[in-house]
Image (cartoon, helix red, strand yellow):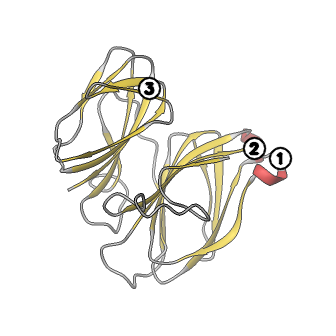
Amino acid sequence: MTRHSFSFGPHYDPANLGFGPLVCHNDDRLDPSAAEDAGYAEHPHTELEIVTWVLEGALVHTDSSGHRHVVEAGRAQVLSAGTGVRHSEVADAGSGRCRFVQAWLTPTAAGGTPSYVLGEAPAPSSGLVEVAGGAGLPVGTTGARLLVARLAPGSSVSLPADPRQHVFAATGAASLAGLDLRAGDAVRLTDEPGQVVTATEETELLVWSFA
């Protein structure tokens, strides 16, 4: 099962094609025991920066450049499709159900060589940790950063001062600018730097921030 934040596949909404360079933000849930939900067979991509954050279980990534990795919960991967790459993504059968969030971004420069990088899991933190872009894994979209925070109930975090941000409550519940966010909810902020997010229960927060 996949929950889409933007137009995707057969669903076309001309008013919801993306947010800045972010053109896809999918919440995927795979079940290795069900063939129709176990994952995605090999398929092609070009000219995309594909960033994946695993929330539960483990995801097996294989691509046409020879990479094969098992990506456990709490780790990120970046696949730069460049001029063209094929890959598959399936739930690791030994790890049970898998949930991951995947974002596609348009690269700053076209025509790059395909590349892949897998990051170490950041230590749990009450603050925002850069996992892609900035001090995190390299992303070929200038000014784009994926930040993750794991918040205890009642704790708060200030969002970056960048002019455009996509805030996603992956788990738990939180409040932001008078809005109550539940797991799976997202807020898009434009020219509202430094907003504060406060967790009302244990929450994993994913923030795409664009300079």
Q: Earlier in the sequence, mark 3 or mark 1?
A: 1
CB-based contact (under 8 Å), mark 1 and mark 2: yes
| Quadrant that contains the C terminus | bottom left
Looking at the picture, which amino acid does disc 1 mark? Ala
- Residue 139 is situated, as x and y percent measured from the top left of the image, at 36, 63
* Residue at image point 39% right, 85% down: 111
- Residue 19 is situated, as x and y percent measured from the top left of the image, at 34, 57
Q: Nearer the viewer, residue 180 or 105?
A: 180
Secondary structure under the numbered disc 3 in the rendered image: strand
Find disc 1 in the rendering and name its residue.
Answer: 34
* Residue at image point 68% right, 46% down: 1
Looking at the picture, which amino acid does disc 3 mark? Thr
Looking at the picture, which amino acid does disc 2 mark? Asp
In the displayed structure, would residue 1 be above or below residue 107? above
Q: How many tags in the picture?
A: 3
Gap in Å between the C-alphas at discs 1 and 2?
6 Å
- Residue 67 is situated, as x and y percent measured from the top left of the image, at 60, 68
Gap in Å between the C-alphas at discs 2 and 3?
23 Å
Find disc 2 in the rendering and name its residue.
Answer: 31
